[in-house]
Image (spheres, helix red, strand yellow):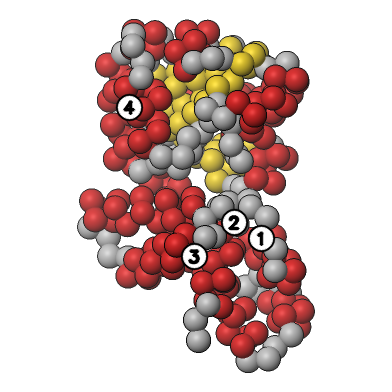
Amino acid sequence: MKVGFIGIGTMGKPMATNILKSGYELMCYSRTKEKIVDLKDRGALISTSVEELIEWSDTIIFMLTTSEVIESLLIKKINNPTIYEGKTIINMGTISPSFSTKLNREFNKYNAFYVDAPVSGSKIPAEEGKLIILTSGNHSIIDTLNPLFKTMGTTIVYYGEIPKASMIKLSINLLILHMMEGFSEMINFASKGGIDLNFLFEIVLSSQISNSLYRMKYKNYLHDKFPVQGSVENGYKDLVLITETAKEIGAYLPLTNINLQMYLKAKELGYAEEDFSAIIKVLEKYY
């Protein structure tokens, strides 16, 4: 199988690296050429255009940030869409269910097979090949892709027809973003009340509310450093997708709408490229 990978960012780079390490032939494309030097050194082929990558590949994975970028690179800038014929196209990023449905229709027009397979996890699980891969689409095609998916993740789950995987991914991200904001509020509240954070974390991380997210992030607050695993920018983007999808399906999400404003404020204050745990800086700015 010849695998093409589009989008060599925080998540895409370690995912592509694990594919390459597993012995697959790999061609990569990134708009930022510096991001793919390491992969080239490891033996990956580097394409000069998306069309070149599509023509070379059997299976194309894209890990891109927005629907606008996806539509531009994969549809609008493709001069000859017949190059998609017979190819398998896999979305592994976070997109809205309605956009995933649109992509499925679009690629079907070109006799290509579209699979919705967003990943759950951040940079460290991506580096360790321990992502959770949520899939929807043609079950038999997804079965043939499982060996490829297992190079990137330890858990691959099938949810049925498109766009159920993207709907589940947004649902999970909704909770994660609330958890991070709530954790930040607790820390800010305790800190303003004179509590040593070491004491606070000793209790929280040994209690029934402890979880892997809090265990992974608590040192950010202790050291006031927020190395990016998942950015504020992506948190904001996901909350926009969630609130837009909620309007489409008729789901009332009052706390999510408030959280969206928190992440917007974080962006406005200049924290867009920091880890999403840096949401605490918004809280610290007030009162």
State which mark lies toward you, 3 or 2.
3
Q: Which of marks 3 and 4 is in front?
A: 3
Q: Name the residue under label 3.
A: 269
Percent coordinates x, y for residue 104 in the rendering: 32, 27
Contact, CB < 8 Å: mark 2 with mark 4? Answer: no
**Residue 77, position as x, y percentages in the image:** 36, 19
Mark 2, residue position: 274
Report the Cα–Cα distance between label 1 and label 3.
Answer: 15 Å
Tell me: 86 left or right of 221: left
Q: Is mark 1 on a helix, strand or loop?
A: loop
- Which part of the image, by quadrant, shows the N terminus? top right
Query: What's the CA distance linking mark 2 and mark 4?
Result: 33 Å
Q: Tag 2's secondary structure? A: loop
Which quadrant of the view contains residue 34? Answer: top right
The residue that label 1 is drawn on is 226
In percent of width and height, residue 286 lies at 49, 81
Q: Which amino acid, by three-letter code, is at mark 2? A: Glu
Sequence-first disc among 1 and 3: 1
- Which residue is more in the foreground, 2 or 147? 2
Report the Cα–Cα distance between label 2 and label 1: 6 Å
